Each structure stands twice: as C-alpha cells, then as structure tokens.
Image (cartoon, rainbow, N blue to C red):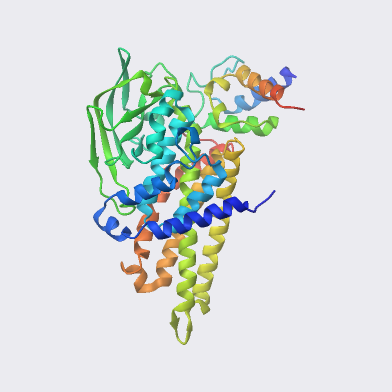
Amino acid sequence: MDFAPTPEQRALREKVVRFARDNLGAQAAEHDRNATFDESGWKACADFGVLGWPIKKEYGGGGLDPLTAIMAYEALGEGCVDNGLVFAINNHLFACAVYIADHGTEEQRRRWLPALCDGSLVGAHALSEPETGSDMLSLTTTAVRDGGGYVLNGTKKFISNGPRADLFIVFARTGGDDVAPQRALSAFVVPADTAGLIARDIPKAGLRGTLMGEITFDGCVVGEDQRLGAEGAGYRLFTSTMEWERGFMFASQVGVLSRLTDRCVAYATGRRQFGRPIGAFQSVSHRIADMRVRLELARLMLYKVGWLRTEGRLAMQEASMLKLYVSEGLKATALDAMQIHGARGYTEELGIEREVRDVLAGTIYGGTSDIQRSIIAGLMGLPTTA
Amino acid sequence: MTDDIAKIVRTFIGEHVRDTELGDDHDIFATGSVSSLFAVQLVMWVERTFDIAVHPTDLDIENFRTVNHVVRFVESRRAATPA
C-alpha cells in the first residue's frame, strides 16, 4: 500500500491549481449573481485539456488513468472558485462523455467524443423526471420503435447544463409491462437541436454558473445508431457508470474542502480579537481541526475510488460512501467557514456565502444522502425497498 | 466444484428472493423477485465470497439472472485467473 502520489501526479496537481487560480473564477460573483455560464472559462478549460482528461487520447482526450484524473479534478476544485463552472464540467464529463466512452460504439465515440473533449459541445444527462428522481426504474419517458429508429416522448427535470447543453444522454422506457424493470430502459445520445426537444431554465439557490433546466421531448425522432448499448441495457449502463458521477464528480468537492480549510486557517491566523488571533480560541481552532480531519478522510476515500477504477474494479459502495461523506462534510465545513468569518462570511464580500449556497446541492444531486445510505445499507445485505 | 459453488449461490439467492420456489434456472430479474439494488449486491457478494475480481463491464444482468448463470460466471472467472 502506497499513499504517496507519484512525482508526475504531484506536478500535475500543482500545474492544475496554478492554471485554475490564474485563469478561472475572476467573474465568479457575476456569474453567480446573473446565473450565467462562463463561456470563456469553459474555453480555457477545454484548451487546457480539462474536458477530456479521463478520455482516451485517440478520441481527443488526455488519456489519464482514473486515479490521476481524480487528483487533477480535485486540484481544479481547489483552484477554481467558480463552483458553477466546475459543476458544469463535472456533468459534461461524468454524466455524458464517460457514458459514450464506456458504452458507445466505435462510430459513436468518434462522432461525439472529440467535440466533447475540445469543448465545442456541452454535454448533459437527462434521467430525472418531474415524478421520478431516485426511483429510476419508474421513469415514464418512452422511446417507441418506429421504422429504423425510435420516437421519444416525455419530460426530464432538474437537468444540469440542460439549457446550455448541445448533447444529452437520455434514459427512456423501451420495454413494456411484460419486461423486467431492469431490462425495460434504454439510453440514447440526443443532440439538443433535435426537432421536438425543448429546454426551459430552472432558477436555483446555488451553483448558479451551471444552468439547470427542464427538457421536454415531444415526438423526437432518433436513429437506432443513437442508442447507447443494447436495447434494454439502460439500467446496466447507469449502474456501471454511476460510479463516475458519485465518485469522480466529488473529486472537485474535496478540492473545495481543501480551499475552504486553507482560507479559514489564513483568516483565523490574521484576524485578531481580544488581543490575539481568533485561531488561538479553541472554539475556532477546533472547528478548523475538524475541517482538516474531514479533508483527510475525504481524500483517502476519493483516492480509493480512483484506485479501484484504475484497477478496473467495482467501486459502487465506495463511491456511495464517498458521495455521502464528502457532500455532508463539505456542508459542515462551509457552514463552519461562514461562522469563523463572522459577518464578513455572511455578506458577499468574501464569497463565503456563495460557497455555502453552492455546497448545499451536493447532498441532493446524484442521489440524495438518504438514498446513498440506503444503497450502502442494501449492499451490506440489509433488506431494501427499492 | 460446480456443485459446491451452486449450493453456496443457491443459499445466498434463496435468502433474498421473494419467490417460494427457486430453481437453478429461475430468472430472478424477470419476475420482480428481487429489488433493483440486488443485482449489485449479488455482484459484490460474488466478488467477496469467491475471491474474484468483478469489473464494471461485468454488471450485466445476463451474468447473474439465475443460479446457473452465476455459477458459470464464477467458473469462467476462476478459469481466467492464473493460479
């Protein structure tokens, strides 16, 4: 067992943090206030290779192994204060591009991945519906066979990147009541300019630099060559790929944990009250010590998921534990950071209040904390209802 | 060896399916006998119990839908693993 990153991984991490600090996030407050997508930041990330790190080089990506990629995205989260931009990248990659990389045909990979890696296409993942969130086997959007293709009908909701996306991974029901639920769903690659596809913006509390929306499919005709994997394989695709979303998407959140902890150390060292730095008071220093413990545990869990994926192993339970721990831990750290920064933390002055709003969604998207606990419990052999 | 594996697999699946009758060719996913999470639970149990590496691409219900399918999967993995 070796806990030390390689020299190459350390160098990459430093390079990414420096890139993010120097090139991203300068307009984070404006993008948050106006709920706008940072197009120039997106372009800068594309040029730096961020949008393709885990994708094979032959498809336009960086070809990083999963563990190294996870470290790079952690560094991105640490260096970039525009959490909305980073979340948009996470969704683009881990909820869209990796589906095509893992399950696409050679033709589909060559058709879509280079444009996703160079940033000319923005990807999204259309699974949740108005009445179906965590219970994916109950989704109602249909894909009905019609000639050589399918016709999609239904509505997806809370789709990150939705109003800005150029390409969607869409899950729809292809099987009837006579088919086992696990074999009734299929996945499709659907461009946003498909006739009958309508996107509507949904305003939200945080991560406002990532646009979120409702996507309606009204008689959208898609070809059989747009189906991802076999007909009826949607649940398997989702299950085997969800580890990317629950594991890798939270790499950047570990970076945010690190950034917030560092900010609190700096503030508690410099800010003086009653003739001493506030960090000399145990009520402050113990909070920061707890932040550091959370960061350490989160990082260990993160790297284990990266290692398992690098080894080609399953990380379902580990990814759920990571997602649960990091999202809840980050919420605690962000709230403590606001408390330590006092009134300045509550106002817009330091951006701490934005960090707090941004971290709240982490316990909801990608499966709520309660769903993660149910998955973990179920994988321990406890009875499940889903 | 196959009988031993089948016995272990039959016992585990039998503890989780809602059907009263579990034959070795009974498709547990076709009849809604188990929860949606059980497929992954079964994969993890196979990995742990038989000390074989299961990969994300193995998460195909075809590999795990009956006792006999699981037995064949375990045997194929063991055969592919150098001693």
Q: Nearer the viewer, residue A163 or A110?
A: A110
Name which quarter of the figure residue A226 lies in: top left
Question: Height in image: A9 above or below A229?
Answer: below
Residue with the most extreme top position:
A147
Question: Height in image: A311 above or below A358?
Answer: above
Q: Is residue A134 visible?
A: no
Q: Nearer the viewer, residue A259 or B29?
A: A259
Question: Height in image: A129 above or below A46?
Answer: above
Residue with the most extreme right position:
B83
Name which quarter of the figure residue B43 lies in: top right
In the drawing, does residue A371 fall left or right of residue A129? right
Q: Nearer the viewer, residue A350 or A122?
A: A122
Please give the count of numbered marks on the rendered protein. 0
Image point 27% across, 38% down: which residue?
Answer: A214
Question: Height in image: A168 above or below B30?
Answer: below
Image point 41% across, 34% down: which residue?
Answer: A114
Q: Position of residue B38 (x, y in %)?
A: 53, 30
Q: Nearer the viewer, residue A7 or B17?
A: A7
Residue with the most extreme bottom position:
A275
Q: Position of residue B79 (x, y in %)?
A: 71, 22
Q: Position of residue A243 (x, y in %)?
A: 50, 39
Q: Position of residue A282 (x, y in %)?
A: 53, 76
Name which quarter of the figure residue A120 lies in: top left
Q: Is residue A55 visible?
A: yes
